[in-house]
Image: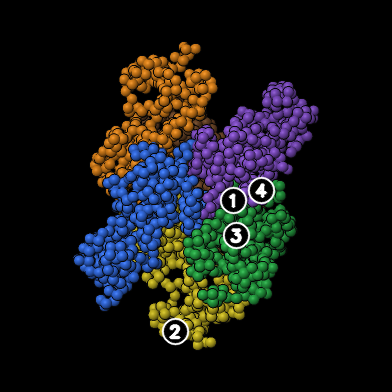
Chain colours: A yellow, B orange, C brown, D green, E purple, F blue
Amino acid sequence: MMHQQQVLISPLHLPVVSQEYLNKLRQKRVIALAMEYIKDDAGAFPLVRAMSEVAGVSAILIGAELLSSSRGYGILLGGISGVPPAKVVILGGGVVAEYAARAAMGLGAEVRIFDNNIYKLSRLKRLLGNSLYTSSINTPVLLEELLHCDIAIGAIHSKTGRTPMVCTEEMVARMKSGAVIIDVSIDQGGCFETSEITTHANPTIVKHDVIHYCVPNISSRYAKTASMAVSNILTPIFLKAESEGGIESLFDEHSGLRHGIYTYKGCLTNHYLGERFGIKSTDLELLIASRL
Amino acid sequence: MMHQQQVLISPLHLPVVSQEYLNKLRQKRVIALAMEYIKDDAGAFPLVRAMSEVAGVSAILIGAELLSSSRGYGILLGGISGVPPAKVVILGGGVVAEYAARAAMGLGAEVRIFDNNIYKLSRLKRLLGNSLYTSSINTPVLLEELLHCDIAIGAIHSKTGRTPMVCTEEMVARMKSGAVIIDVSIDQGGCFETSEITTHANPTIVKHDVIHYCVPNISSRYAKTASMAVSNILTPIFLKAESEGGIESLFDEHSGLRHGIYTYKGCLTNHYLGERFGIKSTDLELLIASRL
Amino acid sequence: MMHQQQVLISPLHLPVVSQEYLNKLRQKRVIALAMEYIKDDAGAFPLVRAMSEVAGVSAILIGAELLSSSRGYGILLGGISGVPPAKVVILGGGVVAEYAARAAMGLGAEVRIFDNNIYKLSRLKRLLGNSLYTSSINTPVLLEELLHCDIAIGAIHSKTGRTPMVCTEEMVARMKSGAVIIDVSIDQGGCFETSEITTHANPTIVKHDVIHYCVPNISSRYAKTASMAVSNILTPIFLKAESEGGIESLFDEHSGLRHGIYTYKGCLTNHYLGERFGIKSTDLELLIASRL
Amino acid sequence: MMHQQQVLISPLHLPVVSQEYLNKLRQKRVIALAMEYIKDDAGAFPLVRAMSEVAGVSAILIGAELLSSSRGYGILLGGISGVPPAKVVILGGGVVAEYAARAAMGLGAEVRIFDNNIYKLSRLKRLLGNSLYTSSINTPVLLEELLHCDIAIGAIHSKTGRTPMVCTEEMVARMKSGAVIIDVSIDQGGCFETSEITTHANPTIVKHDVIHYCVPNISSRYAKTASMAVSNILTPIFLKAESEGGIESLFDEHSGLRHGIYTYKGCLTNHYLGERFGIKSTDLELLIASRL
Amino acid sequence: MMHQQQVLISPLHLPVVSQEYLNKLRQKRVIALAMEYIKDDAGAFPLVRAMSEVAGVSAILIGAELLSSSRGYGILLGGISGVPPAKVVILGGGVVAEYAARAAMGLGAEVRIFDNNIYKLSRLKRLLGNSLYTSSINTPVLLEELLHCDIAIGAIHSKTGRTPMVCTEEMVARMKSGAVIIDVSIDQGGCFETSEITTHANPTIVKHDVIHYCVPNISSRYAKTASMAVSNILTPIFLKAESEGGIESLFDEHSGLRHGIYTYKGCLTNHYLGERFGIKSTDLELLIASRL
Amino acid sequence: MMHQQQVLISPLHLPVVSQEYLNKLRQKRVIALAMEYIKDDAGAFPLVRAMSEVAGVSAILIGAELLSSSRGYGILLGGISGVPPAKVVILGGGVVAEYAARAAMGLGAEVRIFDNNIYKLSRLKRLLGNSLYTSSINTPVLLEELLHCDIAIGAIHSKTGRTPMVCTEEMVARMKSGAVIIDVSIDQGGCFETSEITTHANPTIVKHDVIHYCVPNISSRYAKTASMAVSNILTPIFLKAESEGGIESLFDEHSGLRHGIYTYKGCLTNHYLGERFGIKSTDLELLIASRL
């Protein structure tokens, strides 16, 4: 998605980014923006939100497919009279969790949400109904629910690096045979000790008789919807850029947009990537200031 | 509630009716109607429905009270962020169950309904939401849910005498210590093997550390509401009686009203009561026909 | 699912039944019951209802999968802020339609239901919300909606043989490229002129750039859920049979159960199957009467 | 609504305010407050919110009336079994849009909401249901929906002057004959190129066969409700003024109240009005400071 | 709506039908069917249902309009924060009441429904929410609610002639000044003693300061919606007639259709109309039988 | 709940705290934290919120119990067909009010909420449905509703000391005989002039025939639920304390935790308690700074 010769706006999936990739961007003196680091005027990350909405619904649809007879033990998520609904355990209380819970409940499943942030839980109860099961992450309570669940979803987002590993291998080993884990948090390492990155080509692995789906960037499964969500966010930026003399001039005014830049005209400007790949990183603000 | 000298319309609580009572009615040649046997023009029992609505809500309110610290282990039915909701198991899928489920869900509890009639379960899912847990009465599934529940409600109505005893003493013995059983079906013997009739004065007994509430005619706890519901049904009858020359003339036209009569001018006309108390019963239709 | 030596209760999928199969049953003098023809005491078909519930939800899950990037054009059913929801057109207003609509709406899609029975439409509006789009099957209105839809579901059930073919090939040809047809009615011939029976192994065909899924008996995709629903219905029958001296004695009392029989001790008793396969059929009532 | 001799608190409808009016206020040395500019302690505009709630519901009621046979083509907004619901397109995602959408959905219509702010759209989905149609303002998508809609509502609020003109005359010309436009944004110029201010006496004009309702200050149609909403906001101010020595002393403490003042003892203090009417404006803070 | 030379299918509004009209039909030997008397195969009146749905929503929209400042005291039905919602009293618990209640609640008003049929009330609570206010028609309770209401709707349908007059003039006289009565039952005489038939040209009269809207056939206000609803019902009849050799041949098979006939080739066949207009009526079944 | 020798974290119920108690804490040089004064990182009071959720639901359950025949006039909160629902008036629009309203509505009662903050009312309408009755605290409107209510709940929280006394004795005197007041605000003095602190042993007093329940700290009635809510908040603190070298070291980093301290190693550090009990208070920040 090259806007001009030298500006690249694209997702930056941490698990797949490589040193070579970063070096090429620097050699070509590209200004590269990671869509997921762009902030809006309110300081929030609009793209992360949109992709989280898609990911949450996707996780349930994938789980439903993996429970069907063609793959799993032939359980429908719910809603059938006289047949107890399937149980879905969701780790995390953010946007992924909200949309996963909505979709699961919409299909008639029974949902349990675990998070340690009481405000997130309280918000979810408001949105999804007062009898929603919410709990703080209390290991014995969580284990009890994992033992009986059909789908477990990892949806914890860490602001500062690696997702906390909430479910040990021992806990996974005690889950029902044929149950499904969808670890949406796999981009940040995952919430389950048994999670390992998989691919769209071979999306699942089985451990302890539990099917694991750990494809990073799960929302790409609904590429058109995802790209419409992306374009909802980028289009106003491009329109502004056009009317205000190029995208570079936007950088001066919009610190949220600057926040997305990780290579700038030959320099790596993202401290975290620098550390990870052993490349010296430069402060973007200095670079831009020096340009003036 | 004597309408004229010789007509009595009142509830007839089977568990408390006595031979003496019936004999007195016969000696006084009273025409006695059991409100719960009166049918409306559609062949349904309006009073039973109304009392069942009241009983269902009452059962949950009593359960909530018995779980409070003043009596029980201090659990609120639900709705609190981060605290898993209380679990309510309901045996039966009729009107009592519907209203108990509604009230429990309204307070934020998690409800499981067990019945063998798939149409009743399907109807409840429609009324109460598609993700309502319904199950046929499958003993292992029921036991699993009883083990974890905070309140168990007996709400099975038998058309032909005694409620099926769905929960054995052994199952009750495995329930949580401090859990509560409200056996609304106690009027017909109860759904729990451990149920014994109790009174408004001493409403609970404890067996296997489980609190049992087995007061018959539970709806009398909300006497004014119950009597308004009764008067909604009887008032049109009385108004008609007035305008059509006395209540007796109504009997000729309304077979549903006749269906409520159990003593008629000295005769016992209810076959079931006759068998139970060893009194000869006479066919009402013959009596009325002979009067003409 | 042989109950005794000579009694077979199983689904009878019309599209796959063969003359050989029927002849074998007759040679072995089996009493064969088609589960989908068993009536309950209220004259309704409990198994058809249960399988319809499963089929309705399945149809939406399959449609969602076929719209994903791995198969289709990468559209998520709905719920994403700022991205218009996918459109689902449902032909028919019965139980399959109800459960498909529920699942689609639960996932955030926009649903249109077409049926000529105003009471069914009115019932669906009550169940699914007053702003549900319902329409009589008016060709221009239907065409307009088909042109814009992402998933079209055939869910018309014919009581008397073949489903009416509501969508012509010309209409299908004008649908969006990449759209999906799930023809649940395929067991009865289908509602789309372009429908052809497919299999679980090769479930889809593409015509006019529209993906068709026409696997009969769609509910078998959730085999465990379906079998639990079946056992909810059959278990009480078996229990009764056991306590009342064998399943044959049940036939005398339960005309609904008799209604399911299609071969009886060497005779074909289903008139429709007789006509179709050129086998002489005998009236069951006569056979049973003659037995006494 | 004169509180004391010299203080006027009233709505200031920009489209109707005149130079004469401002001059009179200055000659009489009135302290004039525009209710819509008063801020509460949280920096929000409580009166604008209240009037927006009223305006949103009003817009739908007016639209419904204009679609009735007495004025328009005789379409009911929705809810009738078998008759597709009317379509309502709403431009904007704020409070007016929320209340218009609520009312339209409450009457059974199908609603589409267009806004470029993804957080507003996400919030509306949460409030009004997950299958609400929301879209960014994408001209082809919008045009498609306008072509089929029965009511289009302009509900975009501009913080800085004129509403963006989202619908061109060409788009309006392609709308259905007899469709209705309610341009609530008319106070700020309107969202439709064809909008022109109308009056309560002659509230509609017809262009391209589309009925336009463009009466400014639409909430005055429900005067009593609007005035109760106003008094909910002003009463606490007056009560405070009384107990704290007159309204002027309130100005010192409450910057939100000061924010409403546009003439102060002979001076125009609102910069925008000054520019518009060519009157010199003075900074209020200086005036008040100098008074001390 | 002449199908063939001699068959007329149209609504028959009892309040406006005249002897002249009937005589003309007889002279022209028309077979005239009253749409509202046509029964479907289930014995229900599909047209009455459809028109009742329209009438219920219409009543609320008209009430809302009459409460606006242009006509009434300027009250919005509801939904505004901090302003108590308007109160709507509905007499009757059928389809008109259901749709009026739905629309009123959709707009945020507070609804009270009065009916003596407890099953209708119970059904409405299920459909519209458990906290819906329902009451039997108890004069003191009704009076109390009428005193405080903003809109009162007469929606009682009598199967056998005249609507019961539930509200006396004295009760109306005590209603709020400026309140609105919409008497949908006016076609059958009305539920309010003060009701008098009005016309679309002059739709309201004022008595005791209460605005009365008593236009018969209220659904004609949404003519296109009403005619779509009608055509949903008639189209299948016409299609059948076409394929089965003319509409007359349909009469032989469909007793529900015959039920709609009131003049048949020169004879009046509706007993009630005969009595009212002093015309001899002939039994239709005899006429048709004699034709064969 | 002593964490270490010298640290006490417990609720500090203002109405029951005594000078002796404070002196003992000082003598023992305890660091005492009031749980209700601990702030989280967002500056909110998590424990107050959790206890308010419990208190809101509790208030309705207690009210329901006091209305039952065993205590009061035998009214069920609601939901019974044909019996008008009970009326609940709630003073205040915060978390207690929200949860009380939710529970009351869940049981089928009719709720009226009074508050002067229009944003709180608007928020409650969003959460609890658009037809929720909300009103600013307008004395005549409030009186009218109090006259007809069955339960009145005081749920106003004052940030700065005493709850405003919204209901005078005269207003209480005009309430229905047998009505119930639950004054949750009693900890801060109560909203009703007639409120007096009661105890769990003797929880009610009767004044003017109105039953008053004024037990402070109402949430202790559901002790286990309350303690789970507390532990949800404290557990992360303790875990952190453990891993970071004792709870005292946490004080340095977490100003929200410091905010809860009222005695610190011999000193009273809460200014308000100092004034009330005539004890000199010391600034905590100084004490901690001096320690370093």
Q: Which residue is mark 4?
A: E71
- For label 4, the crowd category at 10 Å Cα-Cα, with few meaning under 14, some 14 to 19 and many 20 or more, is few
Subunit that carries the residue with mark 1: E
- For label 3, the crowd category at 10 Å Cα-Cα, with few meaning under 14, some 14 to 19 and many 20 or more, is few
| Helix, strand or loop status at disc 3 | loop
- Mark 2 or mark 1, which is nearer to you? 1
Asked if marks 2 and 1 fall on the same chain, the answer is no
Q: What's the distance in space between the residues labelled 2 and 1, CA to CA? A: 61 Å
Please give left or right for residue C292 compared with residue F291 in the image: right
Circles 2 and 3, Cβ within 8 Å, touching? The answer is no
Q: Which mark is residue A282?
A: 2
Q: Which residue is mark 1?
A: E76
Q: Is residue D95 above or below residue F64?
A: below
Q: What's the distance in space between the residues labelled 1 and 3, CA to CA? A: 22 Å
Subunit that carries the residue with mark 4: E
Task: Please state which amino acid type lies under the numbered disc 3.
Answer: Met
- Mark 1 or mark 3, which is nearer to you? 3
Residue name at image x 39 percent, y 28 percent: B11
Q: Position of residue C144 (x, y in %)?
A: 65, 53
- Mark 1 or mark 4, which is nearer to you? 4
Task: Please state which amino acid type lies under the numbered disc 1.
Answer: Leu
> Can residue C182 be seen?
no
Q: Which residue is mark 3?
A: D1
Subunit that carries the residue with mark 3: D
Q: What's the distance in space between the residues labelled 1 and 4, CA to CA? A: 12 Å
